[in-house]
Structure formats: structure tokens, C-alpha cells
Image (cartoon, rainbow, N blue to C red):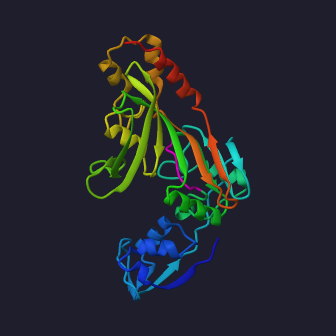
Amino acid sequence: MTSSKHFTFIVSDAYEGGRLDKFLSDQVAEASRNRLQEIIRQGHVTVDGHKIDTIKHKIAAGSQIELFLPAAEETLLTPVSMDLEILYEDDFLIVLNKPAGLVVHPGDGTPEATLVHGLLAHTGGKLSSIGEDGQRPGIMHRLDKDTSGVMVVAKEDETHLKLAKLFEKHEITRMYQALIWGVPLPRQGHIETHIGRHPKNRKKMAVVARGGKKAITYYKVQETFADIACLADVKLETGRTHQIRVHMAHIGHPLVGDSVYGRSATQKMRKAQCNFSEQQTEVINSFNRQALHACKLGFKHPKTGKYLEFTTKCPPDMNMLVETLRTLHI
């Protein structure tokens, strides 16, 4: 476990009127901006002797800022041996292809047998110590349980922090393939909104008029299926929770199989001007997850500076769904 640290800064003229969290992020290499925001909220920062717990607090030139950086909590998770599809690994990071159905880290209702447990077994516990309450060692970003595809994981703290900066600056390429209901018009475009917690259902995310975080998604239709559905490439500029699922539903084209943000396949098929065969109906109705696969991940290696890019094909269940949709005729 890393030890706690204490920092003292004097605000320069260049940061006059700037945000507290942005200032600390620029000064402290030992912590990501997300972690610094949480530390501010926890009351570990003072400005001119006054405790500040607001990340957007405006600072003034000449002010003295003190920061207490708590030691990262050691994980108490028990390693669980599991088969992992490792695409790349060195002393600093791991790139893997996560299968659908595997939860990334422990949380409510999923205390064990997550990807983190498998990674701890695979590495002998050698993962970065940066993570929420020791529950997310090494985790840089997450994919939903039922989303498959490429992820990068940090094995030590310096790499974790440098990767976090790349994510923060949108310098990591993240491409997905998605099966969506209908065909968006235009067939290529971008969606830019703010995403926050759903005002009535806190377990869901939603496009919000006030608050939330800026979210930008690019999409391009690659193949259509009798205008009933389409296969699209989707690229993330930001990485908000459920971003692709929320954005596609927002423009009226939810992901096939998404029971949270979209209507059931049965409802969609009833509205379609198409006669579905028994086999087509069975394949479409039996697809019980959002049809989303993280197919590409590209980034500059934090240690070597070499650009790395990894691509993976859609898993068999999505391929079967695509082949079935190709047989549709109006």
C-alpha cells in the first residue's frame, strides 16, 4: 500500500479564477482527476485555511492550497481463477477481450467472480493500487456486464495515472459495433448531450437538460437489414456510464436486446412491415443482452510511447444475430 502524502501549493496568476479540481490535477501527478475530486468531496483540501469540499470552487492567485492525499486502500479481494482472453501483456498493463456476462468489478449484488477477481489470480495480485475502496484495482474503464470487447488494465500505479490522463484528454481510441433498431437519419453523425442520473429511476442514466456530464458519441451505419435494424460503428469521445445505450435510445434507435433503454424485440417486430419466420423470431427474441461490442482500442503506451491498437471480432451470439437479420425481407 502506498503511504499518505501532504502537499502545499501557492496558486499562480495563470490559475486565477480557475477550478480547484483542475488546479490540483495539473499539480499532482500521483492521483487522477477523478480521485482528486473524491478527495476534495471528502474534505481533505483547504484553501487559505478553510476546508473546501466543492470541486468547482474558484481559486484566486496567491491563495495557499493544502492537500492531504490518503494512502490508496489495499484490496482485500480474493483471487478467482478464470479463463481470460489476453491480447497483450507486459510489466505495466494488460489488454484483454472481455466476454459478455462478466461483471468488471465488485458492486451491489456481484461481490465475487468479477473480472477483477480473475485479474488478481492471473497477475498474482500485481495490479495498480488505485481504485475505489480497493474494489477496482487496475481498472481504467469499464464495460457493462453484457457488453463484450477490448479493455486495458493497469498493473502498477504510474501506468494507471498516465493512462487516466489519456482518457481524460480523449487521447484513447474506442470503437464499438452496435446493432440498433431502425436506421438513423442521417446515417452518419454525432450526438452531443449531457448525461446524468435518470430523475425518476436512479439505476438508469438519461439525457438531462441540467447538470450531468457532457457526452459525445459518433456513429456511422455500415449495413442495414430491411430498414428494420442496422449495424453501426460507434466511436466514443467521452466515456459516460451507458453512454452509447442512452444516446442511441435518445435519437429513437435503441440497441437490439437492450431491456433497460429499449423496447422488447417482440414489440419491434410487431411494428415491422415484415413476415418473420419461426427461426428468425426465435433468434431475435433469444438475444437477451444489448448488442454492443467494443471492437477497437488504441492508445500510446505510457512507458514506451509506442502506439498500440487492438481489434476484436464480434462474439458468436452477435454474429448469429447479424446473419439472421441479413435474411429479413420486407
> Is 140 colored magenta in this rendering?
yes
Residue 179 lies left or right of residue 295; in this view the side is left
Closer-to-camera residue (75/276): 276
User: Horizontal and vertical percent for residue 192?
Assistant: 35, 48
| Quadrant where the C terminus is found in the figure | top left
Chief secondary structure of the magenta span?
loop
Residue at 58%, 49% (x, y): give it: 112
Residue 172 in sight here: yes
Stretch in magenta: 139-145
Q: Answer above or below: position of 128 versus 146.
A: below
Query: Residue 182 is drawn in which quadrant?
Result: top left
Q: Answer above or below: position of 323 versus 241.
A: above
Residue at 67%, 51% (x, y): give it: 94
Q: Answer above or below: position of 98 versus 289.
A: below
Q: Answer above or below: position of 328 versus 18.
A: above
> Is 113 colored magenta in this rendering?
no
User: Horizontal and vertical percent for residue 157?
Assistant: 63, 65
User: Horizontal and vertical percent for residue 16?
Assistant: 38, 80
Residue 326 lies left or right of residue 303; in this view the side is left
